[in-house]
Image: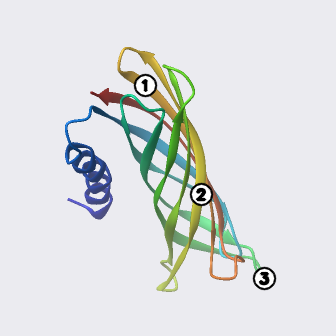
Amino acid sequence: MNKTYKAAILAAVFPLTYSLSASADEYSLSLSLGAANQISSNEIGSGIQGSGLNVKAVTRKSSEPLGIVFSYTGTSDSAEYTISSAPLITADMDYKYRSFMVGPSYDLNDRATIYGLIGSSWARAKINSAGVSLDDKGVAYGAGLQYRIYNDFLIDAHYENTTMGSTGDGADSGTYSIGIGYIFR
């Protein structure tokens, strides 16, 4: 099992154990799985367009509108990129992105929930022709909406942004995700 799927399973199981460890109060847990698409721009590669998955869990006390959101996003891409520095160079590059975030959720009504997220992100760009691998970390933040479409089924949409590098001058990545989910009561 590769690392992406292990991290996705961990992101889904942690909130479940958190929710089940609560006392006799009624809690609900919504899990959603979606497709994630990413567009990055930086001095290494222009127009990196990774695709992958997003796993999200929202847990809350059933009688309260506030909850906690846990999110994992993983994308990757492998293609030929034009390196933006002069002179222009074309290189075969593999790119991976991961983020783990947590934040509050708020039920607007019995169907719609909004949430905010903040956490950490990691990216790796491997330039195959040069045998060079660049790793970077950053802060990820985002916001989203879950909308219950029928009984306990929902649609989840969110956007997250990351600026890599300790000085904030690295890759600027925007990732959006649309998924479906189910509410466990």
Kindly identify the amino acid type of the residue bearing the numbered disc 3. Pro
Q: Nearer the viewer, mark 2 or mark 3?
A: 2
CA distance separating discs 1 and 2: 22 Å
57 lies above or below 128: above
The residue shown at (78%, 82%) is 87
Residue linked to disc 3:
87
Task: Name the one closer to the observer, 36 or 8.
Answer: 8
In the image, 184: left or right of 149?
Answer: left
Confirm whether residue 130 shows in the render.
yes
Local SS, label 3: loop
Task: Name the one closer to the observer, 105 or 158.
Answer: 105
Image disc number at residue 154 = 1
The residue most toward the top is 150
CA distance separating discs 1 and 3: 49 Å
182 lies above or below 93: above
The residue shown at (22%, 49%) is 17
Local SS, label 1: strand
Kindly identify the amino acid type of the residue bearing the numbered disc 2. Tyr
For marks 2 and 3 on the same chain, the one whose residue lies earlier in the sequence: 3
56 lies above or below 81: above
Residue 42 drawn at (x, y percent): 69, 70
In the image, 4: left or right of 80?
Answer: left
Confirm whether residue 47 shows in the render.
no
For marks 1 and 2 on the same chain, the one whose residue lies earlier in the sequence: 2
Are dots 1 and 3 in contact, CB under 8 Å?
no
Residue linked to disc 2:
141
Residue 76 drawn at (x, y percent): 46, 59
Q: Nearer the viewer, mark 1 or mark 3?
A: 1
Task: Name the one closer to the observer, 72 or 183.
Answer: 183
The residue shown at (68%, 69%) is 82
